[in-house]
Amino acid sequence: MKKLLAILTFAFATSALAADDNWQTSEHNFNIKHGDWGLQVRTYNNDDYDHIEGSYKLSDSLTVALRYAEDGVNTEIRPKITHKIAKWGPLSLGQRLEYRYYEGTKDDYFRYRAIVGLKAGDAWIKMQPRWKFGAGQTGDTKIDDVKWQAGYDFTLDKDENSSVKFTPYVEYLTAGQDSSWEKEHLILGTNFTVKF
């Protein structure tokens, strides 16, 4: 009952806050995981972006993925590799390298991000500074933007072979050093994950 109440409260808060200018869109992820394989579908409210991503876990610390995304008239194909470097109690450190290939006239480029996480029970926070490299990119040593996320994992159903998890979160994206760390967006998000 407590989990249902928390979900309903979050749904109400999402609709109430959506009218505020600071919350112009929301991000929603649907994930299916089985063994080492994963599939994610992401969609946004009030935005023309959607993606589908398949992933495969090579080892406990390495995961490869391929994303197909559509954002208005732009189509992107994004291979990426994520590396979990270390975990010290509630603190974790990782990194990701991705290549953003665009069909059409938009420049392709690499993007690297560090992933710093802090977890306390089911509550978590992530900080991800990101750097762009390649065609059309300048000041490659400067941070291009920083993605901050904070959320809470609600386990809705769990047995020895499967689990269902719902995670509401807030995402805050700031521009990089050249733009004086100005806010780019502040949105609500959800993850719905089924693992079997």
Image: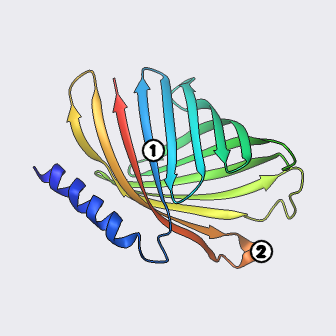
Q: Which mark is residue 178?
A: 2
User: Disc 2 or disc 1, which is closer to the eye?
Assistant: 1
The amino acid marked with disc number 2 is Asp
Given residues 134 and 39, the one toward you in this image is 39
Given residues 46 and 120, the one toward you in this image is 46
User: In percent of the image, x 13 and y 53: which residue is there?
Assistant: 2
Q: Position of residue 9 (x, y in %)?
A: 22, 62
Q: Position of residue 99 (x, y in %)?
A: 75, 40
Given residues 18 and 188, the one toward you in this image is 18
User: In percent of the image, x 62 and y 63: which residue is there?
Assistant: 146
Query: Which image quarter: residue 82?
Result: top right
Q: Look at the numbered disc 2 and give the secondary structure of its residue.
A: helix
Query: Which image quarter: residue 142?
Result: bottom right
* Mark 1 neighbour density, 10 Å: few (under 14) some (14–19) many (20 or more): some
Relative to 131, say whether 174 is above or below: below
Which residue matches tag 1? 29
Q: Position of residue 95 (x, y in %)?
A: 62, 45
